[in-house]
Structure formats: C-alpha cells, structure tokens
Image: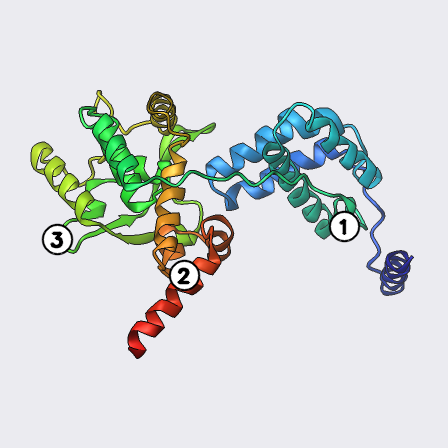
Amino acid sequence: MKEARATFARLLLDMQQGTYTEPSKLMLGSFLGEWLAARRPNIAPRTYDAYANNVRNHIVPALGDTLIRNLSPLQIQTFYTNMLKELEPSTVLQIHRALSSALRYALKLGHIVINPIDRVTPPRPARRIRYVLSDDDEEMILKRFSKSRVMYLPVAIALDTGMRIGEVAGLQWQDVDLVEGYIHVRQTYGYTSEHGYCASVPKSRNSVRHIAIPKRLHATLSSFRERRRPAGDDYVCINMKGRPVKPTDVSTRFTVVMRELGLDVKFHGLRHSHASKLCAKGVSPALVAERLGDAIQTVMSTYVHNPHGLQKYMIDKLDEERD
C-alpha cells in the first residue's frame, strides 16, 4: 500500500510537470537487444559475451515475447524456479544479474514505472567450502607439473600471486620486473565472440596492479627467462606452438591432474588458496584485496574463513609489543 501511494504520487507529479511518459509497448526481447548494444562499449568483452549468452539462451526464450510494461514479479520468480530445475543456482544468479541490470536501465529510460525485479527473491547458491592447499599440496602440484613446458609456469604464477587465469595468460615479459621484484598486471588474454582469442584490458580498475614476487616464483621466472631469452612483448606462458596459452586449455588440464592427485581444487582455486593463506597469516584484508585486484568486501566474504582467528592474531601481536 505504501509503495502504491508513492508510485501514484510520483505519477501525479510527472503529469503536473509535463514529464509523464506513457509505459512502453516494447517487447522485452527487443529491449534486451537495445540494452546489450548500450552496455557493450562500457564493459569487458567477456562480460558482454556472458550477458549476451544469458539473454539469448535463457531470458529471451522464456520472457522475450512479454511486453516490458507487463512483466510481473511472479513471471520472473516462476522463470527462476524453472531454471533451477536445469541449472546450478550460481548460473541462475548470473541470469538474474543480467536481467536486473537490464530492467534498471528500462526504468531509467521510462519504459517501466516500477521495476518488477525489486519484488523478486534471487537464487542463493550454497556457499562452497573451498579447499585451501597446504605447503605439501603445493609442492606436490609443482612437482607433478615440473616437466610440463606448458603447464608449469601458469601453475607456479597462480600459486604465488593469486592472479586470475586470464591475467596469467596475458602476462608478457615486459611486465615482469625481476630487478625490483614485481609483476605488473596490465591485460588479460582469453576468448571473445567478436575477436576470438585476444588480449584485452582487465575487468576493472582494481585489476590493474603491481604484485610483489615471492622468492620461489622469482627463482622460477629467472630460470625460464635465462633459458628462453625472450623479447619484451613475448608472452610468459606459451603453448607448444609459441602462442599464449588458452585459459580453457590450462584450466581443463589442471582439473584432470588434480583428480589424479586426489585434490578437490580447480585452477581458480589457486587464487582462493593464495588469498586464504595470506588472510590466515594475519595479512590485512585491504592488502590482500590490493594484491588480488578485488574489493575488500569480496576478500572479507570469500577468503577470510576465520575472522576470529584474525582478531586473535592481532591481539597476539599487540601482546608481543607490550611484552
């Protein structure tokens, strides 16, 4: 009732001021095409591809023939319920985020007066308990890949930096400063529907960053550079043809080998494990976020598995100073 009164008051004010716009007669499917075109220049290519795939494969087949002004919360909720019969909750959540962004844009343009998605309960994926690698696990993994010309460097870099697979694949030798001991993350490498496999700017401003290189990784990179003597614009992680590794190939091979070793971890899990171990050692979440190119909130919710343990660490340090 309260919301209805507020909506009526807003409509009345719009009419009085001459700014009232008649609800759109656009079909949702047509509008989603306009929304994708408007979003494309402002988002990363892979993000655009994800949005476009969700629109094309899921949203349009179910809701595309609905007038956007007639789209109801019940329709959207039923759509999610049906999707959950076939897809993982995390996938349906991605679909929800795409539709939510599109409808916010529709509201801004005046195609709808009330956003129906505001009354919808999005799917909530169960929080997965991620496996944190022990030092012995890491040594076992590195030993397993030690003779692989393709896999060893991507794994070693991800283990000791927490870099994303696309960032690892996009790393060039000119961005590896072994004198100062830093990796400069400036680009990613992966597949896009428009250009195929190519380099592109990272997903956010936070993703462009400097990462200090640990001793173990420094020795590995120094050894590889000495043997290869690469040019500055050569890629660090290359396949047998000398081209940049494809992220999907690396991830797939890694998963297969982890199963052989009896470890429940995917390639992206190396990032989670790196961050979790830093947090467990009492490193500030702000510093971990800076290293990962993530928001502090993401670090706190994803990697800090034992906040009470972090408080204990801080108190122990305080007691040490007092003693």
**Camera-nearest residue between 125 and 133:** 133
Q: Mark 3, mark 1: which one is toward the viewer?
A: 3
Disc 1: which residue: 110
* Count of residue discs: 3
Disc 2: which residue: 286
User: Counting residues from the N terminus, which is met first, the one under dot 2 or under dot 3?
Assistant: 3
Query: Regarding mark 3 in the picture, which secondary structure is present there?
Result: loop
Kind of residue indicated by mark 2: Ala
Q: Is residue 8 above or below residue 187?
A: below
Query: Tag 3: Cα neighbours inside 10 Å, few (<14), some, or many (≥20)?
Result: few
Disc 3: which residue: 179
Q: Are marks 2 and 1 in contact (CB under 8 Å)?
A: no
Residue 230 in view: no
User: Counting residues from the N terminus, which is met first, the one under dot 2 or under dot 1?
Assistant: 1
Q: Position of residue 297 (x, y in %)?
A: 51, 56
Q: Position of residue 281 (x, y in %)?
A: 34, 56
Kind of residue indicated by mark 1: Gly
Q: Mark 2, mark 1: which one is toward the viewer?
A: 2
